Image (spheres, rainbow, N blue to C red):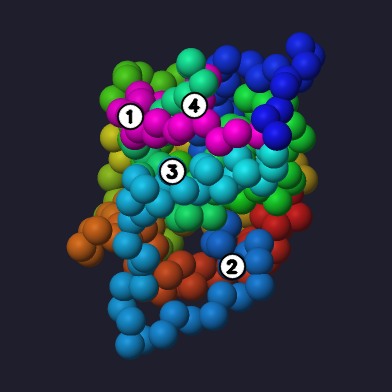
Amino acid sequence: MPERPAKSRRARSEESLSYPLFTEPSPIRSILPEAANSPAPVAPPKTVPSAVPPPLSSQDIVQIFEQEYRNLRPRAPMPPFRIKFRRFVSLNTTIRLREEMLHVSLSDILEGAPESVLRAIAHILIAKIYKKPIDPGHNNRYKRFQYSEPVARRTEQTRSVRGAKRILGPEGHYYHLDKVFDELNERFFQNLLGRPTLTWSEHHARRLLGHYDAAHNTIVVSKIFDRPSSPRYAIEYLLYHEMLHLKHPVSVRGTRRCVHSPAFRADEKRFPQLKEALAFLKRL
Ligand SMILES: [Zn+2]
């Protein structure tokens, strides 16, 4: 039976899903390794070196949207979907209802995103346009993806093309980033690293704690560390991690970007208070 929408239940003609990342002028991502938030991951089988599933075809993606539509509107007629990847300047996704057809534009940053993420996005967009409640599980999956390091990096790279970012500077109330950097450079890198621009973030970001922006050769540190309750080893570890990104540039193997190589991880373990620092970050 076709659904006859009451006036109040009529779908909105357009919805967009802008990543909240963009409300912050300087997105800085969490440097917590994925393992810190979840139980230790099972080591991938050695026999399958690149267990990356092949990217979803556009047909797969349409199917995902149709399934999520069906879940949200079990009896309503299925509208045709037109789904396109667009080169957005920012990570941004929109849905429009035009002449009974749902037009979806996905940021090309989402190309190659895992199926669960696309499913979450499909659910959220369709729920929004038909004013249905958003499932918290899908919302969490979307958020985790949004804040994951590779996504934050690609987003940052895309953004940096658009020009200068605001710089607050290295001098905080309690810590001076340049001084912490110089001290770590001597302790761990024989003073071999050139000092990039160091700056505190504009906001007290909790999820995104530190970030190295290669395009601007800038390390941004969340202002949340610039307070007396924040131990020195925490900011040292944070900066040390970002300095390792200077030492170990992102390598590309095939289609896979390796951000934290084994050599990176081995170096990271040289930080004496690694355990305490990770525990502190987790409590933030
Ligand atoms: Zn990192």
Per the image, label 3 sits on a secondary structure element best described as helix
Query: Which amino acid lies under the numbered mark 2 shown in the image of this protein?
Result: Ala
Instruction: Work out whether residue 10 or residue 113 is closer to the camera in this orientation and state it.
Output: 10
Real-space CA distance between mark 2 and mark 4, rounded to the nearest whole angstrom: 38 Å
Q: Could you tell whether 158 is left or right of 252 in the image?
A: right
Q: Which residues are magenta?
A: 76-97
Query: Which amino acid lies under the numbered mark 3 shown in the image of this protein?
Result: Val
Query: Which amino acid lies under the numbered mark 1 shown in the image of this protein?
Result: Arg
Residue carrying label 1? 86
Q: Give residue 280's quadrant in the image.
A: bottom right
In this view, the residue farthest toward the front is: 1
Report crowding for label 3: few under 14, some 14 to 19, many 20 or more residues within 10 A (C-alpha).
some
Residues at marks 1 and 2 touching, judged by CB atoms closer than 8 Å: no
Residue 9 in view in this figure = yes
Residue 120 numbered tag: none
Dot 3 or dot 2: first in sequence order is 2
Instruction: Work out whether residue 228 or residue 139 is closer to the camera in this orientation and state it.
Output: 139
Q: For the N terminus, which image quadrant?
A: top right
Per the image, label 1 sits on a secondary structure element best described as strand
